[in-house]
Every structure is written in C-alpha cells, then in structure tokens.
Amino acid sequence: MGILFPMAWFSEQISSISVLFNGFFSQQWVHIVMHTSLYAILMVFLCFLGNQMYKKDVYIVWIFIGVIALAQEMLQIILAGRGFTEHEIFDLGIDLSGAVFGFAIYWGWRNWRENEKIKIEVEDEKNFQSCIY
C-alpha cells in the first residue's frame, strides 16, 4: 500500500491519523526499514510472477522497480511542493537496496528449490536402481 498510495500526504488530511503517522514514521530507522521492506516484497512478488525468468526478464523487473521507485519519489515531490533533493536520492538508494535484498531472497529460494529437486531425482534414481537389482 505504501508504494501505491501516498500515506504521508493522506495522514496530513486527517489530524488524528497525522499524529500517529508522524509519531511512528518520523524516526529515520523506521523510514529505512519500511522502504527496504516495501521494495524487497515488491521484488520477490515480481520475481514470483515471472517464476521462469530468463536473464533478459530480470532486467525488465529491475527497470520496472526503478521506474516505480522514481515515480513514488516524484509523487512525493509533487505533493510536498518541493524540488528533487538529497532526501529523494537517499530514498531511491534505500528502495533499490530493498530490491536487491528481495532479489537475493528470491534467488536463494530458487537455488534451494533446484538443489532439492536434484536431490529428489538422485534419490528416485537410486530407489529405481535398487528395485531393478
């Protein structure tokens, strides 16, 4: 939801939500964890959508993530009425770091799954051979 909807802007529209939102999200570590988590989840989701990805498809996912991150920052700039600053560059870096983390999770899962598949095939072959002899 945080990627698709400008929560900071929304919270400013309702004072009771604004107090809660600012009290929690104004802390820098929370901001970093949330951005990293959002983009890690988005990357894992996109990789699972294209589960049989080839190398060229990975580049498309990375371009898509970059476009989403840039669009999110541009939306925040427009709603805040300010220019592109080091804050947006920092956020983009955190967003892409989250995407790298999400890709590492996906890649690790994919490799684990392939290794398990090979182990099962080897065990099945051993069982088959023992049945023959």
Image: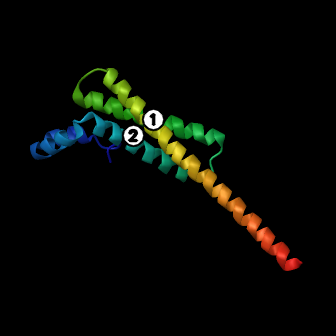
- Residue extending furthest toward the left: 15
The answer to whether residue 73 is seen in the rendering is yes
Precedes in sequence: disc 1 or disc 2: 2
Q: Give the residue pinned by disc 1.
A: 97
Q: Residues within 10 Å of mark 1 (few under 14, many from 20)?
A: some
Q: CB atoms at circles 1 and 2 under 8 Å apart?
A: yes
Where is residue 10? Give x, y as percent: 20, 42
The answer to whether residue 51 is seen in the rendering is no
Residue at 59 percent across and 40 percent down: it is 58
User: With 119 as the anchor, is 88 left or right in this view?
Assistant: left
Where is residue 126? Give x, y as percent: 80, 70
Where is residue 49? Give x, y as percent: 53, 52
Residue at 81 percent across and 74 percent down: it is 128
- Give the colour scheme of this rendering: rainbow
Place residue 129 in its image quadrant: bottom right
Asked if residue 25 is positioned above or below residue 123 in the image, the reply reads above
Q: Amino acid at mark 1?
A: Ser
Q: Give the residue pinned by disc 2.
A: 36
